[in-house]
Image (cartoon, rainbow, N blue to C red):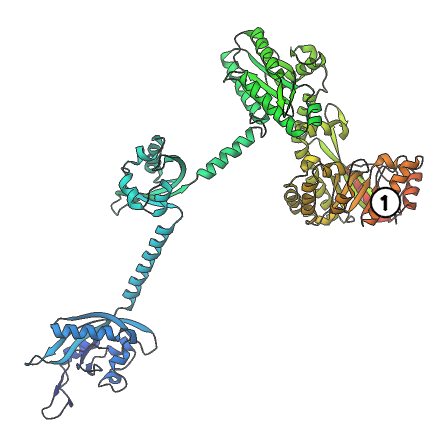
Amino acid sequence: MKTVASRALCRHEPGRDQAVVAMARPPRLLETLLANLDGMVYRCRDDAYWTLEFVSDGCQALTGYAPGDLLLNSRLSFLELTHPDDRDMVRAHIETCLRERRRIDIEYRIVHADGSLRWVWERGVGLYNAAGKVEALEGFLQDVTERKEAAQALQEAERRYRSIFENAIEGVFQTTPDGTYIAVNPALARIYGYHSPEDLIVGLRDISHQLYVEPERRTEFMRLMEQHGSVSNFESRVYRRDGDIIWISENARAVYDDADKLICYEGTVEAITERKLYEAEMRHQATHDALTGLPNRNMLHEHLQRAIQVARQKGGLTAVVFVDLDQFKFINDSLGHQVGDELLKTVAQRLQACLRDTDMVARQGGDEFVLVLQNQTGGEQGIAEVMQRILAAVARPWQAGDREFQVTASIGVSRYPADGKDVETLLKQADSAMYRAKEQGRNNFQFFAPWMDTQVSNRLEMLINLRRALDQEEFKLYYQPKLSLKDGSVIGAEALIRWQSPEQGMVPPDRFIPFAEDAGLIVPIGEWVLRTACHQNKCWQQAGLPTIPVAVNLSPRQLNQSLPDFVSDVLAQSGLAPSCLELEITENVVMKDAEKSVATLHALKRLGLQISVDDFGTGYSSLSYLRRFPVDALKIDKSFVRDIARDADSAAIVKAVISLAHILNLRVIAEGVEDEEQHAFLKENACDEVQGYYFGKPMAVADFTEWLTRRAGSDLPAPGK
């Protein structure tokens, strides 16, 4: 490879081949100039090694070698200093320049004395004799490593940017302020349905009118740009090239030059159609009934509130109508849920067909529907005509398979403002009127009358109070101890819910749980019970009381696929160890859908908690399923325990349950133990655990804490009454 040479002060003596004779040193001025140049001046021969005849002091800084190391190839030639991969390229360039008598101008790499690579820029010329033969080369080398690396870094950055731009999943764009695309990436072309970025730029010339479904969205885009200089998550509907409408989300900013003049807008586009459809579906599910597609209770309340406001401002009669199907439970139980569901959907369609577009039909729950009739100009007579039409429509025969059936409805009507001036009152009065219609023989309608509102404990009142009770923390947990029959030690507690109603005092669970089940309130109530019991158990442990599991009863509505995740979250939030939680599930619940129940129970069991089957013996458990259920204990129903000392059948059932459980390696818990005879029988027949009034009544938190503290301190055997 060639090296650079400064104009050398050497000459050839006649008669001596290639002999080099040192020439006079340059003047002081030239010497100083060469020494201070940021680079290396050279003179070399046009031979195989580019033998240097002169090299300036800049050689040391450039190559790491002293000038004497390279002069006349004393230590190495400049050819060897040139990177091996560049030598052929450099020689070809120099030979071409010498042949064409052009200036040498080239960049290449050299190997520094420390082993590193350096980029150099060489400029030089050939010196020719009278015969046109090259006598030498003179030139200058300068280190351009930093510039070269900076240029390479810039190229790499540009390459990466181009790669990101070309391969980004999101659309990337630049547009002029007047709405013309300057640059787009392939992703944006795909989003908008064009074959290539070029097709998009050529085909989409007017963003405001060609792209946006609502052109005012472009106006809003421009307004935000002028006001803030950027937009974030700007959602719009746009046309694809094929005319389809999609949703997009834009993030963009305004770009200005050094003179603060607007150049363009640039940003990204994300296709969000699937998300928007999903959100719409979620909103629909949150406000509509999954079976019938009608508005649900939440949407009903909002709509009725708006209807009341309109009637208050503009006047007019608004009616709230409660429709309850007669004997629906009998149809549902005898023909099956699938037939029952089809009936509900048919009734929903018939109700809608009887009303105007301005009216609403909602499904309250079960077989109950609520209608909101606005601006009834015909007074009660007009409402009565609508009710007759609804009764006739509902009563029309309907087909289920090859059989024809007929169902009727009981209807109650309340009116705004005569019967109430708020949502809850109007619903309650319509419910009362509906129950009056049932009392009158069903298949009729009744307007609300004040005397119908005398019974405070009607169904709707109970539901209203239950919702309030949950919001205002009127529920309390009581705890009943569970003891070991072997040594009398406390081995657990069952959490039992109570309702401290301001109007009714302490309400037992058998009075309000069925209402909560029907209304769907049992799920949030059950979740509250689980959270509260786990938190309280952790508090007892932190207070130094014995570590015992707390048992919580589950409602049938809670036993679904999301339950394991919810229980896991509750345990994590409370800090309670899973082994300190026991879930009690009735056998009828798990047998309703045994296959799904098995999967859910296994998921719960993997959390590390305990599972027991409550009220065992009252249901219809299959032994094959019981063997598959991942349960830890069977809980004998108190109806059997109550009579074990007097009834041979009850005693035999209890013995059989204990034996069966032990064969399956399950613990046996007897509940409702109230006297010594029951206690002795259970102990004699190897029952494992007991609970009941004989050992301790359900106690409030403070009382149970005191009781547990005394037991822990005294370490007494099992108590009597």
Estimate the x, y position of residue 590 in percent, counting from the top left.
72, 39
In this rendering, the count of numbered labels is 1
Q: Give residue 479's quadrant in the image.
A: top right
Quarter of the picture containing the C terminus is top right
Q: Mark 1 falls on what kind of element? A: helix
Instruction: Please determine whether, in this image, residue 561 is positioned above or below residue 391.
Output: below
| Left or right of 523, for residue 271 | left
Task: Tell me which amino acid carries mark 1.
Answer: Ile
Q: Residue visible at 50% across and 37% down?
A: 278
Estimate the x, y position of residue 498 in percent, counting from the top left.
75, 32
Instruction: Please determine whether, in this image, residue 178 is positioned above or below residue 506.
Output: below
Q: Is any part of residue 410 visible from this angle?
A: yes
Q: Is any part of residue 233 visible from this angle?
A: no
Check disc 1 and report the residue beneath it.
658
Q: In this orientation, which residue lies closer to the viewer: 123 or 596? A: 596
Instruction: Please determine whether, in this image, residue 297 is positioned above or below residue 642.
Output: above
Q: In this orientation, which residue lies closer to the viewer: 398 or 687? A: 398
